[in-house]
Image (cartoon, helix red, strand yellow):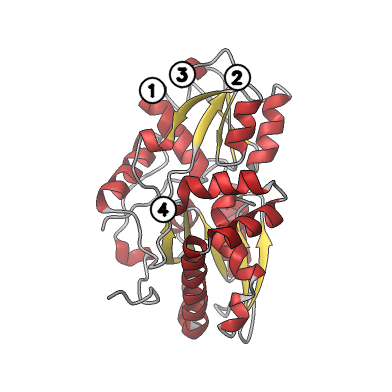
Amino acid sequence: MPWKTLRRTRLVLPALALALVATACGPGGGGASGGDTITLGLPVQATTLAPVYLADDLNLWKQHGLTVKPVTFKGDAELAKAVLSGDVDVAVGSLTGPLTAEEAGQDVKVIYGGFDMTAFAWYAVPEIHTVAQGKGKNWGVTTIGSSTDLLTRFAAAKAGLDPEKDIKVVQGGASAARLAAMKAGQLQANIFTEPQTVYAQKEGYNKILDLADLVDSYPMHVTWGKPGFVNDNPDRAKKFVDTLSQAMKMTKDQPGDAVKSIAKNLKISTGDAQASLAEWIDQLYPDGRMPSAKAMDDFWQMGLQGKVFAKRLPDSQWLDTRFLPKTS
């Protein structure tokens, strides 16, 4: 199925440049950890990462012979820098991370998908009722070059706006921080997932667009790393994928445990955790599949219209399917 690459934006280049220097100066492709230990990078705290939290809370990693050390960053740009420098072995983050790295000349590999969620929605201050009415306003995203950036630029282009000129995209971090910035008057529109969508509605903000109105599937998170780690440690990579697949299946089969894990790790109410899980649980795929060819065509169109993509890369350049669970 077709996959694509993302064009670097100006604000992403410094982070990637630092990563390239760190990669050149750092050790070889052995990764950040030795033995059966894996340093796992996450972009931000998010309810959609429930299977990762569940694997940690139930110590599923140990059952598969692994010691996993999770580290949470302030967005995909920081996460990508850590992977490329070798400080992180494996990342579970947006597809924009590895594709932006590929465009910057780095060799990376996506080894697992499965998080094919349309869990994003845009909210705006009361005087804004449509995306088009957000012209000239400040729009919050996690980091420049992230999935939230790509989607926001696409939404603006879809509404007839020029995402380079008609809106100001502001890097604001995780959803909670951006909601606070919105309440402080620093942002007029924002892209959120649960539970911030609920909180935004309670604050009187208008829901102006839902990602599900644009596409039926989206690569919310993928698992990726440098080939130096993946190729030198195939057993560890396979164990990691198998554990994540098991955790994803348990999330679907035992939603009560997943709700508790979300609430604990994000420090939110059980009700909010349950509402979030219900929104996207049917879009979890333990077999690690990527979205359909049509969905990925839509993903390509998003990057193109949002002026994030430069060109389309062949799957073989960045996608490694050898660790995916066997399906009957």
Whether residue 93 is visible, yes or no, is: yes
Question: Mark 1 vs mark 3: which is more N-terminal?
Answer: 3
Q: Name the image quarter holding residue 107.
A: bottom left
User: In what element is the residue under mark 3?
Assistant: loop
Residue in view at x 43 percent, y 44 percent:
118
The residue tagged 3 is: 130
How many numbered marks, from 0 up?
A: 4
Q: Three-letter amino acid code at disc 2?
A: Val
Rounded to the nearest angstrom, the CA distance separating label 4 from label 3 is: 28 Å
The residue tagged 4 is: 282
Q: Quadrant of the N terminus?
A: bottom left
Rounded to the nearest angstrom, the CA distance separating label 2 from label 1 is: 18 Å
Residue in view at x 52 percent, y 46 percent:
146
Q: Left of 43 or right of it: where is 152?
A: left
Q: Position of residue 291 (x, y in %)?
A: 34, 54
Labels 2, 1: front one: 2
Rounded to the nearest angstrom, the CA distance separating label 3 from label 2 is: 10 Å
